Image (tube, rainbow, N blue to C red):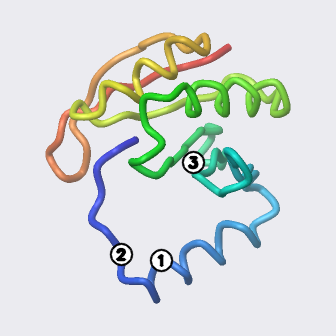
Amino acid sequence: MVGFTSRTRVAFEKHWKRIISDPQCIVMTVESDGNVVGYVSAFPRGERQEIAYWFGREHWHKGIGKNAVAQFLQMHGQRPLFATVADTNPASSAILLRCGFTHVGEDEGPDGQREHMFRLG
């Protein structure tokens, strides 16, 4: 959703282990045709609850992301829920808008990249 520098495999595994072991983080694995294609998660960031998701590039523009986020939102009822999306990722912004989020502003991320902020509820 937002731009970030890719981690090494070891650093990613350490980061992912921390996420899935944190009881405040909720992670839903997304499958399509029996294959894992991504995830949707919610996690605390300061006083706010945020949503994040990732889908393998080969699964983009097939409706998988929108359907997965919509299903996650039905299961995870905590509101308000926030999201931040890099300006270079209009597809993620479209998913959020289709799922009921409202665009609430723009800001500059820590890397200097423009980011869009969304809110649900």
> Residue 84: which quarter of the image?
top left
Question: Residue drawn at (65%, 67%), measured in percent from left and top?
Answer: 19
2 left or right of 15 in image: left
Above or below: residue 89 compared with residue 38: above
- Helix, strand or loop at label 1? It is helix
Mark toward the start of the polypeptide (3 vs 2) = 2
Question: Residue drawn at (25%, 43%), measured in percent from left and top?
Answer: 109
Whether pointer 1 and pointer 2 mark residues with C-beta atoms closer than 8 Å, the reply is yes
Camera-nearest residue between 56 and 20: 56
Instruction: State the CA–CA distance, disc 3 to disc 2.
Output: 20 Å
Above or below: residue 84 compared with residue 101: below
Residue 57 shows up from this direction: yes
Question: Residue drawn at (59%, 32%), measured in percent from left and top?
Answer: 64
Question: Residue drawn at (48%, 42%), measured in percent from left and top?
Answer: 59
Amino acid type at circle 3 is: Arg
Q: Which label belongs to residue 12?
A: 1
Where is residue 102 drawn, in percent x and y? 50, 10
Whether pointer 1 and pointer 3 mark residues with C-beta atoms closer than 8 Å, the reply is no
Where is residue 7 drawn, in percent x and y? 36, 75
Whether pointer 3 and pointer 2 mark residues with C-beta atoms closer than 8 Å, the reply is no
Instruction: State the CA–CA distance, disc 1 to disc 3.
Output: 19 Å
Where is residue 48 drawn, in percent x and y? 61, 37
Residue 27 shows up from this direction: no
Camera-nearest residue between 40 and 78: 40
User: What residue did someone put label 3 on?
Assistant: 45
Mark toward the start of the polypeptide (1 vs 3) = 1
> Residue 94: which quarter of the image?
top left
Which marked residue is nearer to the observer: mark 3 or mark 2?
2
User: What residue did someone put label 2 on?
Assistant: 7
